[in-house]
């Protein structure tokens, strides 16, 4: 019976029915089935678990639901065998700011009082949960969270960025309409408030013309005032929504900072191990904030170096041997030559294994056969050069956001300079296959490059032709059919 009660309360809490959970806490303390002090302590431990999780996950509604019944529950839990355990729970709540200090002090007084429970208010009705003959407990003052805290919890749960974007676009359209109507009023030839204009009317025809212009002016003025009033109302909505967005994005930024700080710890530990292993070599990790931009990242690394330093730009998805270091030194000449190696790029090996049913699927990273990958003749992201030559041609264009184009831009600068470009295939550098995601925020040129890189990495022409030959649904498909 007790096990069922405990599981039921947990189930209700997880599903969001926190009020039912808190009522269960009070109700089961009063029932004879739960008269055992041990049973009451277990329920308090359950309450502690729910409240602490509610605090961590910013779910104040769970904490509030228990707050309203704890006073009465504590009044029924003064047994000396469990009192120290409950006092300890109250102390933990205070240390972790689960409940206000004043509220916890009052709860501690209720628990430790030797006298009977507080007397009821005059003519107070006995609740169904109170047995006849027992002294009803006067509920203590309820400590409710401020409206700000409740609002923040509601914002974090309900805020939708897309709705805010749509609202901003709608407001911008309205703002344009109001501005246009104001210009229309400003361009009117008739000054309806001018007594002189009215006094110059000489005949009926002029009066009729003036009347029409006056009515037209009034109509446009009323239209403008109506739109301006609507704009003011929308401004209030926009201000409120922007305030909500600040709460939402502050929380998102806080969580992102937690992840970023954890990443810093991991990277510092990893590279600290490398530093220890390789002794005197300097290994440094530079952390930066903001949206991903390869050009900015490479530039941030380059500025740490001196003019006569030899730079080698390489991506994390490239595997290589120590042989490349010799070629980098030999093929890069300060003031005269930069080195752009042609890297071998793997095809999707899992595609080959699945189609040809190869098991186990062995991947040899330095298999340079035509069905294993292709040479990236038009890849310019991997390069070595001296810092002085990088600055000579103007460096990276840091205005380029996201992936792609920054390497082509730098290659073009070198091709138009007096510095020679040396290109050659390098069998000790391989671009490992990984799935490619083309961000919808990329501009047209970047998107074209990304899709081209993605499509080129599926398989060789020989394998793709074989796939088509072995797949009748594709081979026999009618022109224009999507099936």
Image (cartoon, rainbow, N blue to C red):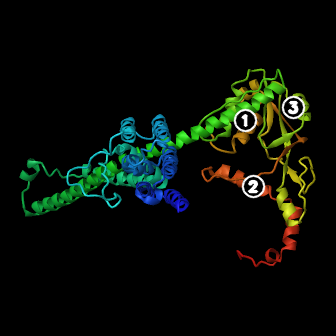
Which corner quadrant holds the C terminus? bottom right
Residue underneath mark 3: 328
User: Picture coordinates of residue 318 (x, y %)?
Assistant: 81, 42
Instruction: Name the residue rendered at 36%, 54% in the picture.
Output: 174
Residue 274 or residue 283, whichever sits in front: 274
Across and down, in percent, residue 196 comes to 9, 48
Q: Nearer the viewer, residue 218 or 390?
A: 390
Task: Mark 2 or mark 1: name the one nearer the start of the chain.
Answer: 1
Please identify, in this view, whether the residue under mark 3 or under mark 1 is nearer the observer: 3
Residue tagged by mark 1? 413
Residue 126 in view (yes/no): yes
Answer few, some or many: residues within 10 Å of disc 3's Cα (few below 14, many 20 plus, some between 14 and 19): many
**Mark 3–mark 1 distance (CA, rounded to whole Å):** 20 Å
Disc 2 target residue: 454
Residue at left 80%, top 58%? Answer: 458
Disc 3 is placed on an element classified as helix
Circle 2 crowding by C-alpha within 10 Å: few under 14, some 14–19, many from 20: some
Depicted 93 relative to depicted 419: above or below: below
Task: Tell me: 242 left or right of 375.
Answer: left
For the residues labelled 3 and 1, say whether their Cβ atoms are less than 8 Å apart: no
Give whichever of discs 3 and 1 has the lower sequence position.
3
* Residue 408 percent location from the top left of the image: 73, 42
Q: Which label was assigned to residue 152?
A: none
């Amino acid at each position: 019976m007790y096990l069922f009660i405990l599981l039921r309360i947990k189930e209700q809490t997880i599903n969001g029915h926190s009020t039912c959970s808190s009522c269960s806490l009070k109700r089961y303390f009063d029932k004879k089935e739960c008269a055992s002090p041990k049973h009451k302590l277990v329920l308090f431990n359950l309450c502690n678990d729910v409240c602490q999780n509610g605090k961590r996950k910013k779910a104040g509604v769970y904490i509030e639901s228990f707050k309203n019944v704890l006073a009465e529950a504590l009044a029924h839990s003064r047994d000396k065998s469990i009192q120290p355990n409950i006092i300890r729970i109250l102390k933990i709540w205070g240390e972790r700011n689960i409940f206000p200090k004043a509220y916890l002090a009052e709860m501690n007084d209720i628990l430790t009082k030797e006298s009977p429970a507080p007397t009821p208010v005059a003519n107070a009705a006995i609740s169904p949960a109170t047995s006849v003959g027992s002294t009803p407990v006067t509920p203590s003052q309820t400590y409710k969270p401020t409206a700000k805290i409740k609002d923040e919890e509601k914002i974090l749960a309900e805020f939708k960025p897309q709705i805010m974007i749509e609202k901003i676009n709608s407001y911008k359209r309205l703002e344009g309409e109001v501005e246009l109507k104001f210009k229309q009023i400003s361009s009117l030839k008739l000054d309806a408030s001018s007594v002189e204009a009215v006094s110059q009317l000489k005949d009926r025809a002029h009066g009729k013309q003036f009347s029409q212009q006056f009515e037209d002016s009034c109509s446009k003025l009323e239209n403008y005032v109506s739109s301006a009033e609507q704009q003011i109302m929308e401004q209030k909505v926009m201000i409120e929504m922007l305030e909500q967005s600040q709460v939402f994005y502050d929380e998102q930024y806080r969580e992102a900072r937690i992840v970023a700080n954890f990443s810093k710890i991991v990277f510092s530990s990893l590279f600290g191990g490398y530093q220890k292993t390789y002794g005197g070599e300097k290994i440094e990790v530079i952390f930066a904030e903001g949206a991903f931009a390869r050009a900015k990242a490479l530039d941030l690394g380059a500025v740490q170096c001196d003019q006569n330093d030899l730079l080698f730009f390489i991506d994390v998805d490239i595997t290589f041997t120590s042989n490349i270091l010799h070629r980098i030194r030999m093929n890069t000449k300060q003031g005269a030559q930069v080195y752009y190696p042609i890297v071998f790029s793997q095809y999707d090996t899992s595609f080959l294994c699945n189609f040809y049913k190869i098991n186990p699927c062995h991947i040899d990273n330095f298999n340079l056969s035509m069905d294993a990958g292709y040479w990236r003749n038009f890849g310019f992201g991997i390069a070595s050069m001296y810092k002085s030559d990088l600055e000579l041609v103007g460096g990276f264009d840091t205005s380029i956001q996201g992936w792609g184009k920054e390497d082509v831009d730098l290659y073009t600068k070198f091709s138009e300079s007096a510095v020679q470009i040396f290109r050659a295939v390098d069998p000790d550098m391989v671009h490992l296959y990984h799935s490619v995601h083309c961000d919808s925020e990329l501009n047209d040129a970047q998107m074209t490059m990304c899709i081209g890189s993605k499509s080129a990495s599926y398989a060789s022409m020989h394998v793709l032709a074989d796939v088509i030959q072995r797949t009748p649904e594709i081979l026999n498909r009618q022109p224009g059919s999507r099936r």
